[in-house]
Amino acid sequence: MYKKKILIDLDGVLNEYGKEPFDENFIPKIKDGAEDFVKNLSEFADLYLFTSRSLMLSAKWLFENNLDKYFKDVTNVKLPSYLYIDDRCICFRGEYSKTLDEIKNFKVYWK
């Protein structure tokens, strides 16, 4: 069975990002529901963790949170994919003026 590739951001999507000051050497705890989410998603998609953090630290975090079995790899490269799941993104829907408005009014959900 062919599975579509999906890249999932780590900070703010899978972990409790934004509640503590940023520390590049510490990844916050797993977000409630994250394991069920990736488990269900992995049934029909190939998952890749997409992060700007240390790849080694991020892979260790996946392992410590029992998520490693759902991911094909950890990357900091925007691989060609069916979709990207991120807490800091705007979906371009073909209209520049609406996209500019969304950018001007953008707030991450955790602020």
Image (spheres, rainbow, N blue to C red):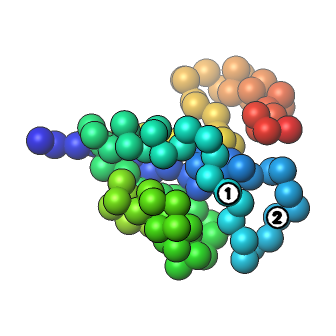
How far, Cα to Cα, is label 2 from label 1? 13 Å
Identify residue for label 2: 22
Q: Which residue shows up at 52% across the image and 73% down it?
A: 60
The picture places residue 30, in percent across and down from the top left corner, at 62, 53
| Crowd around label 2: few <14 · some 14–19 · many ≥20 (10 Å) | few
Q: Say whether disc 2 or disc 1 marks the residue closer to the N-terminus.
A: 2
Q: Is residue 81 visible?
A: no
Secondary structure beneath dot 2 equals loop
Q: Which residue shows up at 78% across the image and 24% down it?
A: 101
Q: Amino acid at mark 2?
A: Phe
Q: Which residue shows up at 70% across the image and 20% down it?
A: 98
Residue 111, picture quadrant = top right
Q: Is residue 70 left or right of residue 87?
A: left
Report the residue that reaches farthest toward the left: 1
Identify residue for label 1: 29
Which residue is more in the foreground, 31 or 85? 31
